[in-house]
Amino acid sequence: MSELLVDANPFPDGLDARLRAQLAFLVEVDRLKTVLRQSPLAAAARRENDAEHSWHLALMVGVLAEYADEPIDIGHTVQLVLLHDLVEIHAGDTPLYDGAAAADQAAREEAAAERIFGLLPPDQAERMRALWDEFEARRTPEARFAKAMDRLQPLLLNWMARGGTWRTPGVTADEVRARKAVIGDASTALWAAGRRLIDEGERRGWARSTATNS
């Protein structure tokens, strides 16, 4: 992926250089719509893409902010969830239950962050990279809640799919709980609800019990 999308149909001469860079970035991130995730849609028989995922998280922030254990700035949190997966344009999606793919995930995504945010004017590149770093580090209430949404959203989709990626070979209900426990770092109430869904999914046989997986 060496060329930018805009190179296929360059903007006309005369555009302000800053605006040109911003528009080129906005065209380039259209690629996010082509990055498929593992989660199935609730409304159609296909997998969701990263852009759909990010939109869903932004809506969830506005709807579920009242359950945050700490006060959060909703607008700031929305920014975090909207840009957190832009790196996957170059790094690809790393499935939650794929340990091998996760081994070099951090390095791939760091390089991708430099590349995608580097398309912007320097001041905006620095600001957006800082937001991405904030999401990854989870040191602020907003970042913790954003991460919670990132883990809760596919949980809801997997529930609607009667298991979905919970049925990944070798994955147990206990592993699902362990991977989703980060929700509790931001919202006790939402993690209680998430655990209830996982527990019921296990009871219905949608996620393997550890005892039956051995």
Image: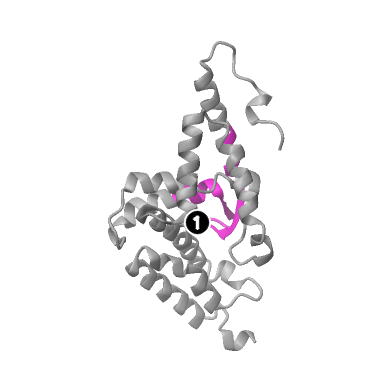
Q: Is residue 54 magenta?
A: yes
34 to 144, vertically: above or below = above
Residue 190 picture location, percent across and down: 36, 67
Left or right position of 62 against 120: left
Residue 198 picture location, percent across and down: 47, 75
- First to last magenta residue range: 28-56
User: Can you identify the residue that label 1 sits on?
Assistant: 43
Residue 169 picture location, percent across and down: 66, 74
User: Number of numbered discs present?
Assistant: 1
Q: Amino acid at mark 1?
A: Ala
In the image, 157 versus 69, the foreground residue is 69
How dense is the environment of label 1, judged by Cα within 10 Å: few (below 14), some, or many (20 and up)? few
In the image, 140 versus 80, the foreground residue is 140
> Which part of the image, by quadrant, shows the N terminus?
top right
User: Which quadrant of the structure image shows residue 4?
Assistant: top right
Q: Secondary structure at mark 1?
A: loop
Which residue is situated farthest in the bottom direction here? 211
Please name the residue shown 53% across and 18% down the image: 17
The reply to whether residue 197 is in sight is: yes
Residue 191 picture location, percent across and down: 39, 69
The reply to whether residue 92 is in sight is: no
Which residue is situated farthest in the right direction here? 2
Please name the residue shown 29% across and 59% down the image: 70
